[in-house]
Each structure stands twice: as C-alpha cells, then as structure tokens.
C-alpha cells in the first residue's frame, strides 16, 4: 500500500482510497510500528500535494489522528505544512471532533500539546 501511494502521489483518487485503507488498518490493529515512520512521511506528502482536495484532506487527517493521536494533528499546524487556510480549518475541525479522554492518543496528557 505504501509503495503504491508513493508511486502514484499525484493521483488524488488513489490517495483518497489509500488513506481510507490506512485508517481501517490502523483501527483493526494491523498497523505495525515498523511502518509508521514511512507512513507518516507519505502522509505528509499527501497533505502537501492534495490539501486543496477536501475529501483527500479529510481522510489523510483521519489517518494521522488514528495512527498517532491528537498530537499528530498539532504537529503539521505548528510546522507550517498547511499552506491553504482551508487546510488549517480542516485540521482544526479534526481536532475538534476528538473526544479527549475517550480514545487512544487523546488522554488528558495530550490536551496541553493541543492548546500550546
């Protein structure tokens, strides 16, 4: 999957369905730590290339949150990865949809990182 997403980086629909699959894999426990670094690099590439596609952006942000929790959504905001205001709004909406304290990667210890 990661090789396909990397090879077809310019194809929005491939990125969309690849992100949906990555979100499903991470939720089912199939996602291994050995893939997370490469996956995050590809996810950042998808964000940069497809941030004007709202559907792809929604799913790639969902993957980021599923893989690494709330803090992972804050990192691109702080580093300036998002170039379009609509991308920043999408990331903030994703953060707003998290039930802090009720899911993995969104415990009380994550709140300061989100606020800061």
Image (tube, helix red, strand yellow):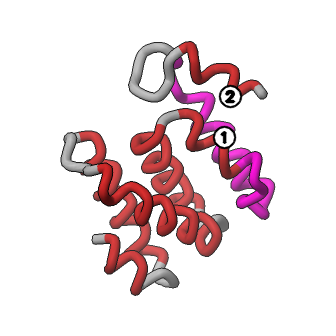
Q: Is residue 86 magenta?
A: yes
Give me the disc on residue 84.
Answer: none
Q: Secondary structure at mark 1?
A: helix
Question: From what the image shows, is residue 81 above or below residue 42?
Answer: above
Q: Is residue 3 magenta?
A: no
Instruction: Return the x and y of residue 4 as percentages of the image width and height.
Output: 32, 79
Q: Which residue is identified by label 2?
A: 113
Q: Nearer the viewer, residue 13 or 99?
A: 99
**Residue sitting at x 59%, y 36%:** 71
Q: How many marks?
A: 2
Give me the disc on residue 74.
Answer: 1
Instruction: Return the x and y of residue 5 as percentages of the image width and height.
Output: 39, 75
**Residue sitting at x 52%, y 27%:** 98
Q: Are marks 2 and 1 in contact (CB under 8 Å)?
A: yes
Location of residue 67 (image quadrant): top left
Local crowd at mark 2 within 10 Å, few (<14), some, or many (≥20)?
A: few
Boundaries of the magenta span: 77-100
Question: From what the image shows, is residue 14 above or below residue 62?
Answer: below
The disc, 2 or 1, on the residue closer to the chain's N-terminal end is: 1
Q: Nearer the viewer, residue 34 or 90?
A: 34
**Residue sitting at x 40%, y 86%:** 7
């Amino acid at each position: 999957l990661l090789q396909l997403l990397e090879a077809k980086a310019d194809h929005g629909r491939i990125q969309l369905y690849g992100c949906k699959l990555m979100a499903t894999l991470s939720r089912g426990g199939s996602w291994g730590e050995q893939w997370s670094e490469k996956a995050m690099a590809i996810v950042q590439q998808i964000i940069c290339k497809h941030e004007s596609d709202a559907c792809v952006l929604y799913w790639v942000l969902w993957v980021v949150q599923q893989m690494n929790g709330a803090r992972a959504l804050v990192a691109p905001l702080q580093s300036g990865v998002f170039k379009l205001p609509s991308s920043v709004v999408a990331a903030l909406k994703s953060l707003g949809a998290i039930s802090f304290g009720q899911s993995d990667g969104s415990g009380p210890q994550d709140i300061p990182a989100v606020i800061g």
